[in-house]
Image (cartoon, rainbow, N blue to C red):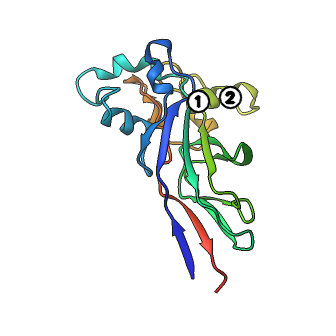
Amino acid sequence: MSDIVKTKWEFRAVNPPEDRGRLGDFRPAEVPGTVQMELIRTGDIPDPFLKDNLKDLGWFYGMSWEYRTILPQVPAEKPCHMVFEGIDTVSAVMLNGELIGRTDNMHVRYEFNLTGKLTGKDNELKVLIECPVKYAEKKAKTSDCKASEGQCHGSPKFFYSHIRKPAYSAGWDWLGFVPAASGIWKPAYLHIDDGQ
């Protein structure tokens, strides 16, 4: 028999612009979900798909995000894994301040073995999500595989061939910049196996 433990999540901007400093404070997040949907829900950004609201979201470029939750205490002998059905996209996963893994593909499921690591009462799990546009740009500069100028679109350019994320998620050639989707976009849960 196994237990599936779903927890409550919070999120914040890691590097908010000065005029949006409040985004640096943790606030409730729905998981699965995306940063953009949370910010629309809380009224921090307008719906980007209405009128010309996209023009007001240029500040979104370069933003990194942090999600956190508290995991329960689990006896050391019980096998347990943190399961992420989908993280969009490049992230570092930390447990109580220690790196336990990284993600770099929004299309795959990730499992991190936490057996014996949840013996304390309040175990803080963080997911630090890097700006996908900046990550792809950095990878493009160091890669032997160069994308043609016409292959990349948006302003700033989105080098989507260097990241496992859909090209449309950061703009189109005819649309310009779109705030790149980020978040824990599929279910995330603690899987505890009681060994039976």
- The residue shown at (34%, 26%) is 45
Q: Identify which amino acid the numbered label 2 is placed on.
A: Ala
Q: Which mark is residue 159?
A: 1
**Extreme residue in the bottom direction:** 196
Asked if marks 1 and 2 touch (Cβ < 8 Å), the reply is yes
Q: Nearer the viewer, residue 195 or 34?
A: 195
Q: Earlier in the sequence, mark 1 or mark 2?
A: 2
- Residue at the spot of label 2: 140
* Residue 185 horizontal/vertical position (percent): 46, 49
* Residue 74 horizontal/vertical position (percent): 65, 66
Q: Identify which amino acid the numbered label 1 is placed on.
A: Phe
Q: Nearer the viewer, residue 57 or 167?
A: 57
Give the crowd class for mark 2: few <14, some 14-19, many >=20 residues within 10 Å: some
Determine whether 4 is above or below 103 in the image.
below
Q: As drawn, is 147 to the left or to the right of 173? A: right
- The residue shown at (44%, 52%) is 32
Looking at the rendered image, the quarter that the N terminus falls into is: bottom right
**Extreme residue in the front direction:** 121
**Extreme residue in the left direction:** 51
Determine whether 111 is above or below 10 in the image.
below
- The residue shown at (31%, 37%) is 41
